[in-house]
Amino acid sequence: MMPERVGSESVLWSVMGVFSVLLFFAGFAVFILMVRQKRTAGAGAALLTILLSYGLFQHIGAFLRETGRAAAQTAGRFGAAIPDWLVLSVCVALTAGELLLFCSIVSHRKNRITLMSIKEATDGLPMGILCYAPNGRILLINPAMERFGSLLTGELPTDGSLFAEKLHTGEFLPGCQVIDAPETLVIRLSDDTVWTVTEEVIPYEGVRIQAIMVSDITDDYQKTLELRRIQEKVLTLNAKLVKTNREIVALTAEQELLAAKVKIHDELGQNLLSIKRLILSGCGTESEAAEILKRLRENIDFLKGEADVVPDEYELMIGTAKRLGVDVVLSGTLPQTEPFKQIIAAGIHECFTNTLRHAHGDRLHVRIAENETLLTAVFTNNGEPPTGEIDEKGGLKLLRALVERVGGRMTVSVEPDLSVTLELPKEV
């Protein structure tokens, strides 16, 4: 049987012999890699493949060296009676096993953090990183930090302590400067890019590793400058609006005061006519004469009042309301900062005017309350409640515009009584 087997399958056995040699060396390489990765189980599996491939090589070699009966006798000692398909199956199994072990090695290397993987990861970062020992020896630096250091000092950082000292002392190339350093150091380079610099201490095995990190914030910085310019414009516009509102309030108060004086003047004329009729008829009573005298004194006292605008808006509004016959009752503390002062003063003016004209009342209640984020003012009166919905026009419309301009909210309620509520945010 052996001569026939040799004659018909010698080529196949030769190929398997060469393949077993390759499996032996491949298993040896896998074994070394497993040992380097400190994987005991993998190294044991690789050692098993080495032994199997070596045994397979010995069996195939014995078969190919011997012929005839001697071959049968020699091969029998090495298992020459093993079927061909079983030998081929062992080759395939060893190949598959070594491939699986090799894939495991590659996967373990990819998923394991090593010094090289850290270096590769930091090299791809857009931010610059520099780590150095207390003696200044650089342990890690990536290309972004090398570029930053070259643009800042004109040379690559070679000593971490020296580079950190230059950052703090400002020893930069012309065109580079520190533009902001309240908490975090911000530096503008000569190419008009803006970088933020942060430092950190990383304890590692009893050694304090110094780390310097830089990040490109050019876009964010430009947006911040633009926001500052917009803020300055808004503040300027707000100052103009505050001045305009103050002028509107003062002008409105003057108009109301003038209208009141005209009304008093007319009443004064009527009182004089009443006196004339009383004198000519000679039949007036003392009570009528006293009443006419009282009205005359009130008219004269009012006309003697100062016509100039009072500098303080609250005094102006409350004084004007008092002269017109409306008492303003305050609860809480009136705000003294702008733009709240102008808005509350405008609210007092509008509400005492409506109290006098429409509600025919003589008392206006103003309740002020505030917390950390909101200031609230509620206006109510003792006059007649409205019979229908409130049509906001004129003064109420202007008051709502003032409130909403600063991000506040105005609510007009008619139930159970008429009330005007102003809610003003503290952060304007």
Image: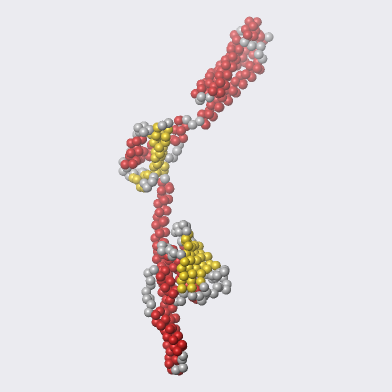
Q: Position of residue 297 (x, y in %)?
A: 41, 83
The residue at the far right in this view is: 1
The residue at the far front in this view is: 286
Q: Position of residue 223 (x, y in %)?
A: 42, 50
Q: Is residue 255 above or below residue 243?
A: below
Q: Is residue 201 above or below residue 427?
A: above
Residue 119's image quarter? top left
Q: Which quadrant holds the N terminus?
A: top right
| 240 on left or right of 31 | left
Q: Position of residue 163 (x, y in %)?
A: 34, 37
The tally of labels here is 0
Residue at the location (39% across, 42% down)? Answer: 197
Residue at the location (62% across, 18% down)? Answer: 90
Q: Which quadrant holds the C terminus?
A: bottom left
Residue 245's image quarter? bottom left
Residue at the location (51% across, 24% down)? Answer: 38
| Structure colour scheme | secondary structure
Q: Position of residue 411 (x, y in %)?
A: 52, 65
Residue 385's image quarter? bottom right
The residue at the far top in this view is: 70
| 413 on left or right of 178 | right
Residue 50 visible? The answer is yes
Q: Nearer the viewer, residue 288 or 205?
A: 288
Q: Nearer the viewer, residue 106 or 253?
A: 253
Q: Nearer the viewer, residue 425 or 301?
A: 301
Residue at the location (55% across, 27% down)? Answer: 104
Q: Is residue 49 above or below residue 170?
A: above
Residue 33 visible? The answer is no
